[in-house]
Image: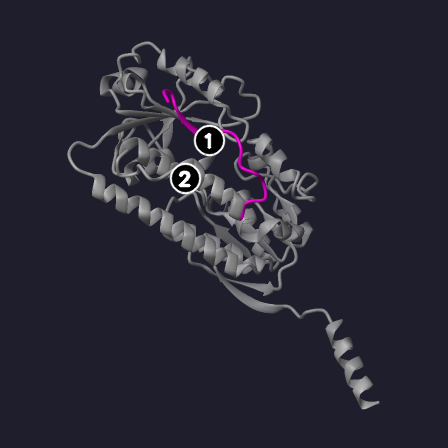
């Protein structure tokens, strides 16, 4: 009788819902944010593929709203692939987007999340909305891969893991990323010597007849200088990104040219890289750039060191793959045993729910 009573008591206890307990999370900015755990309602506003890598498909069951435009609007082909394996993604409620001023604190508050995962640039530019959200007791955890800073990459990955209860997976990812990053820089340090190679990068979104943005100490510009090369755009454009005068590129005669493509919506002239990119299609597009007035005589064109690279690889948890590819173009001997495509294929197999396919980077000449 006593045994049956004891078993019944234990059974009753197992049906009692878990009581929320305070959990302190250190975000990308070093802020100590207290949330109630376990978390069951999350708003995600950016870094969707990073969130997926850390939290897994199961983590999306806890997401009750998102900012759709940066994913479904900017790169619908990639969004569609994830929507096929994440059941609630296609119909996910939208809270608006920071960049086009549609972000709505009211929608976030109405969704009643346990926590909001917010980009650093969104957090800093939408101060009023952030104050409205925190005023009603909803904590905001800042995630930042855009700074291209190793410590922030690692802090962001660990913060997502702690919020979502996937700390072990997050720690494995952080350790893996740090090892790849440090290996790249160690190889670069050994390979450096003599004249720095000059690199020109351009956003290849609107066709060869249109000069696209280049980047000054951010995005591709930051990667170029981190890899010990000279960024042609440094000091030559106003602000972080802008088109560079065509004559300046010809005058400086870069050693390496990178053309950043992607699967943008309604951009038929773009260099189409990514899951649906094909070598023939990419090389045809690259050839049109190489045929620009004055480009045939450039060192990069003559040596075949003109490459397409997926723009979406930049400022991510898998940007080490882009670093490997560019470093291999700069220091072929030091990176002879490094295969960036295999690196990205393996990353997909281990951390992402979608299969690797397509072409993410490719030189004009094999």
Residue pushed farthest top? 293
Q: Which picture quadrant has residue 233?
A: top left
Residue 133 rendering spot, x and y as whole percentages: 59, 53
Q: Which residue is mark 2?
A: 321
Which residue is painted at 59% across and 44% down in the image? 353
Label 2's element?
helix
In contact (CB < 8 Å): disc 1 and disc 2: yes
Count how many numbered circles sit on residues in the image: 2
Q: Quadrant location of the C terminus?
A: top left
Q: Quadrant location of the N terminus?
A: bottom right
Which disc, if any, is residue 181? Answer: none
352 part of magenta stretch? yes
Q: Which residue is mark 1?
A: 360
Q: Is residue 191 left or right of residue 134?
A: left
What is the distance, in whole Å, between disc 1 and disc 2 at their CAs?
Answer: 10 Å
Determine if residue 217 is in view.
Answer: no
In front of the other: 136 or 292: 292
Residue 241 rendering spot, x and y as whole percentages: 38, 30
Residue pushed farthest front? 337
- What span is colored magenta in the figure? 351-366
Of marks 1 and 2, which one's residue comes earlier in the chain?
2
Residue pushed farthest left? 194
Q: Residues within 10 Å of mark 2 (few under 14, many from 20)?
A: many
Q: Is residue 31 left or right of residue 263?
A: left
Q: Residues within 10 Å of mark 1 (few under 14, many from 20)?
A: many
Q: Which picture quadrant has residue 21?
A: bottom right
In front of the other: 174 or 342: 342
Label 1's element?
loop
120 part of magenta stretch? no
Determine if residue 170 is in view.
Answer: yes
Majority secondary structure in the magenta region: loop
């Amino acid at each position: 009788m006593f045994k049956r009573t004891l078993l019944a008591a234990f059974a009753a206890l197992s049906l009692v819902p878990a009581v929320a307990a305070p959990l302190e999370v250190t975000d990308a900015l070093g802020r100590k944010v207290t949330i109630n755990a376990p978390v069951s309602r999350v708003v995600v506003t950016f870094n969707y593929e990073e969130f997926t890598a850390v939290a897994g498909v199961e983590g999306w069951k806890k997401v009750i709203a998102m900012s759709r435009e940066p994913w479904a609007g900017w790169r619908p082909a990639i969004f569609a692939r994830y929507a096929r394996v994440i059941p609630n993604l296609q119909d996910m409620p939208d809270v608006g987007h920071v960049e086009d001023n549609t972000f709505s604190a009211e929608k976030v508050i109405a969704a009643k999340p346990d926590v909001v995962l917010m980009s650093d640039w969104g957090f800093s530019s939408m101060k009023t909305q952030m104050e409205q959200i925190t005023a009603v007791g909803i904590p905001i955890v800042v995630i930042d891969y855009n700074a291209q800073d190793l410590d922030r990459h690692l802090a962001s990955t660990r913060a997502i893991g702690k919020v979502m209860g996937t700390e072990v997976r997050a720690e494995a990812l952080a350790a893996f990323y740090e090892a790849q990053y440090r290996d790249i820089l160690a190889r670069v340090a050994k390979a450096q010597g003599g004249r720095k190679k000059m690199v020109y990068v351009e956003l290849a979104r609107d066709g060869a007849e249109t000069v696209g943005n280049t980047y000054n100490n951010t995005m591709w510009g930051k990667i170029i200088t981190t890899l010990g090369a000279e960024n042609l755009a440094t000091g030559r454009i106003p602000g972080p990104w802008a088109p560079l005068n065509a004559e300046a590129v010809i005058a400086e005669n870069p050693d390496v040219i990178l053309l950043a493509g992607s699967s943008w919506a309604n951009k038929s002239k773009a260099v189409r890289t990514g899951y649906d990119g094909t070598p023939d299609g990419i090389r045809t597009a690259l050839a049109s750039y190489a045929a620009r007035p004055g480009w045939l005589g450039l060192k990069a064109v003559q040596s075949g060191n003109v490459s397409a690279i997926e723009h979406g690889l930049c400022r991510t948890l898998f940007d080490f793959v882009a670093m490997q590819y560019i470093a291999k173009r700069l220091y072929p001997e030091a990176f002879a045993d490094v295969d960036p495509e295999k690196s990205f294929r393996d990353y997909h197999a281990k951390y992402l729910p979608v299969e690797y396919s397509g072409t993410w980077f490719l030189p004009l000449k094999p």
